[in-house]
Each structure stands twice: as C-alpha cells, then as structure tokens.
Amino acid sequence: MDTVVCQWEFDSLDQYFTMERGFFVSPNENVQSLINTFNSYATSGYKEIYEVIQ
C-alpha cells in the first residue's frame, strides 16, 4: 500500500477539481504511460480531502 500526500492552496474546491480534471484532458505520452501503469496495478483506491482552518 502506498500513500501520497500533497498540499495545495485553493480558494474553493471547484478550483481544485478543475485543476485535477485538467491533468487527464490530454496528457502527453509519458504521462499517459504513467497513468496506464498505475491503473494496471490498482485494484482499489480512495481520496481524502482535508480543509485546514487557521
């Protein structure tokens, strides 16, 4: 099991989801190969989104 943690700042969740969907619109050959490799080994997964309130 692998865990990847990323931290970004956005004004809204809509901005985050727009950015995330943009990654998959037209990936170059190297990125598409990486996506295919990850997908071939994945059997399940999930995403957790946390809001930091300061």
Image (tube, rainbow, N blue to C red):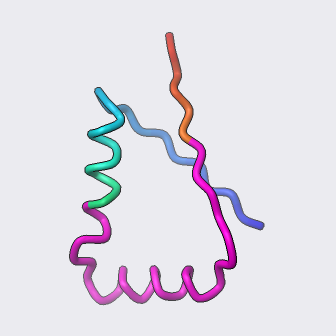
Q: Is residue 46 above or below residue 25?
A: above
Q: Quadrant of residue 10?
A: top left
Q: Position of residue 3 (x, y in %)?
A: 68, 57
Residue at 35%, 86% in the rendered image = 30
**Is 53 left, or right, of 48 in this rendering?**
left
Q: Which residues are magenta?
A: 22-48
Magenta highlight on residue 27: yes
Res 42 quadrant in image: bottom right
Q: Residue furthest left?
A: 26
Q: Residue furthest top?
A: 54
Residue found 72% across the figure and 64% down from its top: 2
Of residues 31 and 51, the one drawn nearer to the viewer in this rendering: 51
Residue 13: give x, y in percent of width and height.
36, 35
Give the residue displayed 58% in from the left and 52% down from the top.
Answer: 47
Task: Return the residue found at the far right.
Answer: 1
**Above or below: residue 45 compared with residue 29:** above
In-image side of 31 versus 15 (left or right): right
Task: Find out whether residue 33 is within the magenta segment.
Answer: yes
Where does the N terminus fall, quadrant-wise?
Answer: bottom right
Residue under the image location 37 percent in, 32 percent down = 9
Instruction: Choose between 34 and 14: the one closer to the eye.
Output: 14
The number of callouts visible is: 0
Measured as percent of width and height from the top left, residue 17 is found at: 33, 48
Answer left or right for 39 relative to 23.
Answer: right
